[in-house]
Image: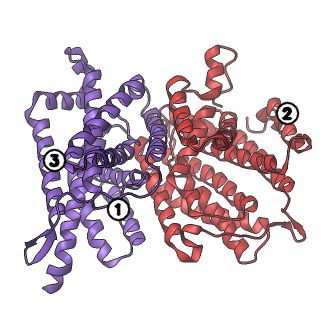
Chain colours: A purple, B red
């Protein structure tokens, strides 16, 4: 019982916290994939730029909360400009080109940030300190805030897609962009705004996780692979699947690290993915025939 | 078809190019530094060419070729470190190791198409990377450093930049010949058929997955052999050789040169290596330049450098077999 309370429970919560943030990242990735057919390699860099934009704002204003508003806006705008300038000309081309283009963008973004902020690790102090007694243990307040915030965001996104006209348009564009275009909707604008939104979500995830992890130019590279695995596991293009898979991976990673060293954890996560794909080739909720 | 004279399959321009490459060290400007740079450039070109078999001819984008490359390099490094100096044993060991790994990867990855294939190869490669990065037997993140020279046969060490250069020229020549023969063969034509329309190829009675696995294996083994040659020049093998960004650079080279041309990716690889070398000697933000070059190519020259010729209407390059 002591083991459960002192070790297992906190680790489980860590996993949920991480999973929620990972969900924000993977959700943007999967929506863009469904919409544009592009597996966005630069998504990790948008995540990283969110953390760095936050670092910049905090250095200027000493306010984490202001950074939490400004960083997604800045990265969202960068995302929108990038989409219009580079992805828009590729709409009718093979998805392969999008993959390679975003790989190039990722290289350029990463290096640009390294030049601007330097390559060393930075820390962001959590804006909420202290901890709360919870179920017989104490748990850091900031992580509880992160879990609540990310869960609320996920809920808000779900409401956006199911209850608003804008969300309906995005889903319609995923289904059949040409038909939507024929109905008089400005489809390129839907694409651009969705891309900006997904960039802003990635930035938010980057900044929210910054006080837990460290901020450095390669943080996106490490994260994007996990996000890819989440998207594949959930079933490509399935939003609900991504969120479920994000929590599964978050908790699995966190619990595995109790019994294994980090590299074994990484390999175990890869093994989970490969096994799931053998048993369920389209992931948890993937639909047949989507972009194959 | 496949018993046409070699010269006709390879084509006389290629023979001229290889003659020039063979004579290149005689040029006065070829210092030690440039010989080794040429080694890197041609090796990169050879890898890009092997990858082109998969991307350009079969239509499968592998994001995991760095693992084949790195495994080949480690195979040589492990043997050299333990006092086995024979180049041939190193190459044979690399074929064995890379072959076994490629068999597993290609079995699972070729069952899926498109983006799934790309991501599966990526994840498999990442498993290998993680393994070598954290296994102290293989030096962990430092890799295996300070390797002795390999021997062509006892007494003849591949020690001078000139010998290393000729090693890679010979490898490139043989690999190029193999690829040309392959794409001109029945096997190569089926690969193109799969690229063009996989379902139709299946209806015509081709065992599509077997052909895809074959293409994967050949491409992986050629890349692995290139990897096995690398420590002969560098005297080290590090896990960074297997990083997925390395796979990305291979794809960049193929794209720069032009898909499905074999010759194009070789030039793409050479161009990429020289670009990286030259830009990085001027500025330390060369990844911005390389990233933007890639974006530019995708946007404006999707068929690569040879595609540009094609656009100008000069002469359509021999594309597919």
Report which residue position mark 2 lands on.
B16
Left or right of B153 on screen, residue B122: left
Residue B203 seen in the figure = no
Residue drawn at x 80%, y 46% as measured from the top left = B34
Residue drawn at x 61%, y 49% as measured from the top left = B219
Mark 1 or 3, nearer chain start? 3
Rendered image quadrant of residue A49: top left
Report which residue position mark 1 lands on.
A275
Nearer the observer: mark 1 or 3; the answer is: 3
**Are the residues under marks 1 and 3 on the same chain?**
yes
Where's residue A288, x and y in %?
Answer: 28, 42
Q: Specify the subunit that label 1 lies on.
A: A
The numbered mark at residue A220 is none
Report which residue position mark 3 lands on.
A154
* Label 1: element kind: helix
Is residue B229 depicted above or below A287 in this figure?
below
Please tell me how crowded label 2 is: few (under 14), some (14-19), or many (20+) other residues with Cα within 10 Å.
few
Q: Nearer the viewer, residue B276 or B251?
A: B276
Nearer the observer: mark 3 or 2; the answer is: 3
Q: Specify the subunit that label 3 lies on.
A: A
């Amino acid at each position: 019982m002591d083991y459960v309370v002192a070790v297992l429970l906190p680790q489980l919560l860590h996993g949920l916290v991480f999973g929620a943030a990972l969900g924000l990242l993977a959700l943007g990735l999967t929506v863009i994939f469904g919409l544009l057919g592009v597996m966005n390699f630069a998504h990790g860099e948008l995540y990283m730029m969110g953390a760095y934009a936050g670092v910049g704002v905090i250095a200027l204003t000493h306010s984490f909360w202001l950074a939490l508003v400004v960083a997604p806006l800045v990265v969202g705008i960068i995302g929108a400009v990038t989409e219009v300038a580079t992805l828009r000309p590729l709409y009718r081309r093979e998805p392969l080109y999008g993959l390679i283009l975003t790989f190039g963008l990722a290289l350029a973004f990463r290096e640009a940030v390294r030049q601007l902020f330097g390559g060393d690790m930075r820390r962001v102090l959590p804006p909420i300190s202290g901890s709360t007694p919870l179920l017989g243990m104490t748990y850091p307040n900031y992580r509880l805030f992160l879990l609540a915030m990310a869960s609320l965001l996920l809920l808000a996104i779900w409401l956006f897609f199911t209850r608003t006209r804008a969300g309906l348009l995005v889903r319609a564009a995923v289904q059949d962009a040409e038909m939507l275009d024929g109905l008089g909707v400005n489809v390129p604008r839907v694409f651009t705004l969705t891309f900006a939104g997904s960039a802003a979500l990635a930035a938010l995830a980057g900044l929210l996780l910054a006080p837990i992890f460290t901020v450095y130019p390669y943080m996106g590279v490490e994260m994007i692979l996990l996000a890819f695995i989440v998207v594949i596991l959930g079933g490509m293009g399935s939003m609900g699947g991504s969120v479920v898979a994000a929590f599964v991976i978050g908790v699995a990673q966190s619990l595995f690290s109790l019994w294994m060293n980090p590299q074994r954890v990484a390999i175990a996560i890869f093994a989970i993915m490969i096994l799931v794909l053998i048993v369920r080739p389209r992931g948890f909720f993937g639909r047949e025939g989507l972009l194959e | 078809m496949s018993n046409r004279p070699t010269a006709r399959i390879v084509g006389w321009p290629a023979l001229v190019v290889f003659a020039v490459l063979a004579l290149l060290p005689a040029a006065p400007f070829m210092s030690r530094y440039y010989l080794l740079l040429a080694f890197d450039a041609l090796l990169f070109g050879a890898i890009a060419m092997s990858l082109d078999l998969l991307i350009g001819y079969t239509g499968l984008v592998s994001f995991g070729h760095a693992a084949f490359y790195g495994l080949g390099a480690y195979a040589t490094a492990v043997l050299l470190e333990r006092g086995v100096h024979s180049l041939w044993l190193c190459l044979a060991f690399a074929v064995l190791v890379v072959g076994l790994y490629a068999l597993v990867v290609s079995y699972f990855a070729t069952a899926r198409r498109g983006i799934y294939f790309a991501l599966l190869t990526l994840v498999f490669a990442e498993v290998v990377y993680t393994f070598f990065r954290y296994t102290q037997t293989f030096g962990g993140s430092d890799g295996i450093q300070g390797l002795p020279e390999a021997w062509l046969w006892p007494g003849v060490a591949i020690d001078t930049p000139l010998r290393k250069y000729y090693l890679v020229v010979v490898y490139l020549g043989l690999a190029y010949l193999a690829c040309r023969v392959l794409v001109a063969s029945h096997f190569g034509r089926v690969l193109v058929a799969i690229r063009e329309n996989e379902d139709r190829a299946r209806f015509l009675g081709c065992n599509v997955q077997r052909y895809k696995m074959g293409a994967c294996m050949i491409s992986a083994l050629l890349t692995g052999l290139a990897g096995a040659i690398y420590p002969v020049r560098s005297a080290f093998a590090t896990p960074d050789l297997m990083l997925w960004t390395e796979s990305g650079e291979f794809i960049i080279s193929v794209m720069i040169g032009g898909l499905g041309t074999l010759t194009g990716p070789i030039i793409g690889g050479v161009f990429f290596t020289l670009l990286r070398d030259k830009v990085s000697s001027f500025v330390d933000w060369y990844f911005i330049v390389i990233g933007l070059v890639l974006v530019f190519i995708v946007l404006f020259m999707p068929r690569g450098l040879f595609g540009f010729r094609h656009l100008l209407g000069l002469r359509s390059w021999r594309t597919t077999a």
